[in-house]
């Protein structure tokens, strides 16, 4: 880095006693010295002021100032994986030696370099398959089960690799799952839901929530609190895409969220949110002067084979950037907890976009019938993410920035430079197993899902520090569990609704298992398995650049525009699907601003031919 500022009553009582004892042991204040902080972090970065005008204190930093070995067991903050990335049509094998700290010559910066090379490698997959072949090598560093934080401000300073096909990403991931280890994430990624409602409708192949608020739990046996819905949420600070010429590039910040809202609210692919009614998307989204909603990906269409999860993808970013690869940018995400909280993104200090806590509320749509009661679909209230989050940095090659087909072989090796990582908090809440969102015991009891255990774990390095509010919340969860048990005994209606929700989840699980078997059988027979059943026909389009939670479409490739203008014009109307024969050059969905959007699509098609996959995509959607 440089020096720039940049479940039985007995168990409930036992668990409650543990909470109280832990609270007394750890207290609620920060230590005088920051254990997780790099001493090379400049004094001017020890505190910052957030957009809420609150002062935030540094609780973690890594300046990458000296040579390091990131192989498992060698570093206290990071684990560099040694595994093939089979998610999202991944084509790179992650190896520790692809991550080094050295000087970025010409920039006066000593930084972490993630090097992506055209060198094949054969090894294990995250789900245990042996001898999988990958044509490229790269690196992924995780702080999983080492450093985790809940709420605060996360900032990276980085210079991106140039070239189509490369997928540099700076992100955070719920510690209850583990990035790219699909077995740990199925039914958890990216759930943020703490309700038990039979009204929730899931897409056909979507796995139900693995840890549901409908279920009583025994902490001693399962390591989980009773009647608490849990998940492995994902917050992406940056996913970057630099063109082969360096200009016309873009970056995106996003939230992946399950369960998704009814399809009535989802904008058509390549359209943008309408002012109201069909396609109006989420409420509470705001965009900065240069921020734009990503109209190229709202999540898997209804009916997709999304066997790890079928989330909504909420994202926004900036386009037409010419210096992502020639300049160090700062990428900041503010994650504010509570009913007045939200998530916001800032690139180089400029506000890009945000979503408020109200965005996670209930979404419902009803249709009247000539006779009988209205027919409704709804998604009950979700939560602003509250899970302890680990940090992730990597360069992938998959369903983003054109995929492997967009690599022109003129930009090898590809270097992704990270100058620093810093985390600040107003209320200190650091540790991977908070009292109200425990993960330690659950992970230990299910360790086979997570790959090679990370060493050393965070508590071997630094003490966990949780605020009194976390202990109070854990006590509230236990008190709620007592009320739920009493209600189910005394109120047959409450018991019936809980049984209905559990039965619906069991039905969804059975459907998911059948879909998984079908995919495995098709793969064994060498047949394509990436079927999509969208509500509106996509004609011959395929998404040339989509986010981390992206499916694979068995459709011909073609270039498409990634972003459209914001839907904040008074005359916004639902986008209309266009017949391909009448508009062969443009995408099937055209936005409500008509002529302007069409012209923009044509211009982007000319400028971004590199975005198109050269081959049709095949393969089922793996998610994380």
Image (cartoon, rainbow, N blue to C red):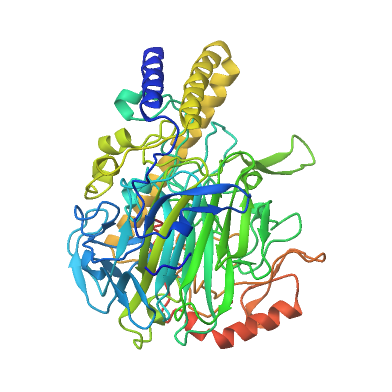
Q: What residue is drawn where x is 22% and y is 48%?
A: 455
Left or right position of 248 against 356? left
Residue 300 seen in the current view: no
Which image quarter: residue 373? top right
Coordinates of residue 128 in the picture (x, y in percent): 22, 54
Q: Nearer the viewer, residue 435 or 367?
A: 435
Extreme-top residue of the structure: 490
Quadrant for the C terminus, please: bottom left
Left or right position of 590 against 103? right
Q: Is residue 11 above or below residue 168?
A: above
Extreme-right residue of the structure: 570
Q: Nearer the viewer, residue 338 or 573?
A: 338
Residue 471 seen in the current view: yes
Q: Nearer the viewer, residue 619 or 290?
A: 290
Q: What residue is drawn where x is 52% and y is 70%?
A: 251
Q: What residue is drawn where x is 52% and y is 35%?
A: 194
Coordinates of residue 248 in the picture (x, y in percent): 55, 82
Question: How many marks on residues?
Answer: 0
Coordinates of residue 451 in the picture (x, y in percent): 24, 50
Coordinates of residue 568 in the picture (x, y in percent): 75, 64
Q: What residue is drawn where x is 26% and y is 53%?
A: 127
Q: Is residue 32 above or below residue 317?
A: above
Quadrant for the N terminus, please: bottom left
Which image quarter: residue 536? bottom right
Q: Is residue 575 above or below residue 483?
A: below
């Amino acid at each position: 880095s440089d020096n720039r500022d940049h479940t039985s009553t007995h168990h409930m009582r036992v668990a409650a006693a543990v909470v109280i004892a832990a609270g007394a042991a750890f207290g609620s204040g920060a230590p005088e010295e920051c254990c997780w902080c790099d001493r090379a972090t400049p004094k001017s970065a020890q505190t910052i002021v957030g957009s809420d005008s609150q002062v935030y204190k540094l609780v973690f930093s890594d300046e990458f100032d000296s040579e390091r070995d990131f192989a498992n067991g060698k570093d206290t903050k990071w684990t560099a994986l040694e595994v093939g990335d089979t998610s999202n049509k991944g084509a790179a094998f992650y190896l520790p030696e692809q991550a080094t700290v050295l000087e970025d010559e010409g920039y006066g910066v000593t930084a972490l370099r993630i090097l992506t090379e055209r060198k094949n490698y054969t090894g294990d997959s995250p789900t245990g398959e042996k001898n999988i072949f990958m044509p490229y090598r790269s690196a992924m560093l995780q702080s999983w089960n080492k450093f985790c934080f809940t709420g605060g401000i996360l900032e990276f300073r980085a210079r991106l690799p140039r070239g189509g096909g490369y997928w540099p990403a700076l992100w955070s991931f719920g510690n209850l799952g583990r990035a790219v280890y699909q077995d740990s994430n199925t039914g958890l990624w990216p759930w943020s839901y703490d309700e038990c409602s039979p009204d929730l409708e899931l897409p056909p192949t979507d796995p139900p929530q693995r840890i549901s608020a409908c279920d009583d739990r025994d902490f001693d046996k399962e390591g989980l609190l009773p009647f608490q819905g849990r998940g492995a949420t994902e917050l992406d600070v940056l996913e970057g895409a630099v063109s082969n010429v360096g200009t016309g590039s873009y970056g995106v910040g996003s939230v992946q969220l399950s369960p998704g809202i009814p399809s009535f609210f989802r904008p058509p692919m390549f359209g943008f949110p309408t002012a109201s009614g069909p396609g109006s998307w989420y409420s509470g989204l705001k965009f900065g002067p240069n921020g734009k909603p990503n109209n190229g990906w709202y999540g898997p269409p209804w009916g997709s084979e999304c066997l790890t999860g079928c989330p909504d993808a909420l994202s926004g970013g900036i386009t037409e950037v010419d210096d992502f690869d020639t300049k160090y940018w700062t990428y900041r995400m503010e994650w504010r907890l509570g009913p007045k909280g939200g998530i916001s993104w800032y690139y180089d200090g400029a506000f890009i976009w945000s979503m408020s806590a109200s965005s996670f509320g209930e979404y419902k749509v009803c249709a009247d019938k000539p006779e009988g009661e209205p027919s409704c679909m709804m998604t009950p209230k979700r939560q602003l993410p509250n899970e302890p989050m680990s940090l992730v940095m990597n360069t992938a090659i998959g369903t983003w920035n054109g995929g492997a087909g967009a690599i022109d072989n003129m930009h090898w090796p590809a270097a992704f430079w990270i100058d620093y990582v810093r985390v600040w908090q107003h209320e200190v809440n650091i540790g991977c197993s908070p009292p109200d969102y425990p993960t330690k015991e659950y992970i230990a009891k299910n360790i086979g899902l997570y790959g090679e255990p990370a060493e050393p774990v965070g508590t071997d390095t630094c003490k966990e520090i949780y605020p009194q509010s976390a202990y109070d919340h854990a006590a509230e969860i236990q008190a709620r569990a007592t009320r739920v048990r009493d209600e189910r005994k005394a109120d047959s209606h409450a018991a019936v609704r809980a049984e209905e929700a559990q039965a619906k989840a069991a039905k969804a699980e059975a459907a998911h298992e059948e879909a998984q078997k079908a995919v495995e059988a098709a793969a064994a027979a060498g047949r394509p398995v990436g079927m999509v059943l969208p509500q509106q026909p996509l004609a011959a389009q395929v998404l040339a650049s989509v986010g981390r939670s992206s499916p694979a479409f068995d459709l011909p490739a073609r270039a498409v525009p990634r972003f459209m203008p914001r839907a904040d014009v008074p005359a916004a109307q639902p986008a209309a699907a266009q017949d391909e024969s009448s508009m062969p050059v443009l995408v099937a969905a055209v936005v409500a601003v008509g002529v302007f959007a069409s012209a923009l699509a044509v211009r982007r098609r000319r400028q971004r031919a590199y975005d198109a996959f050269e081959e049709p995509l095949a393969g089922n959607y793996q998610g994380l």
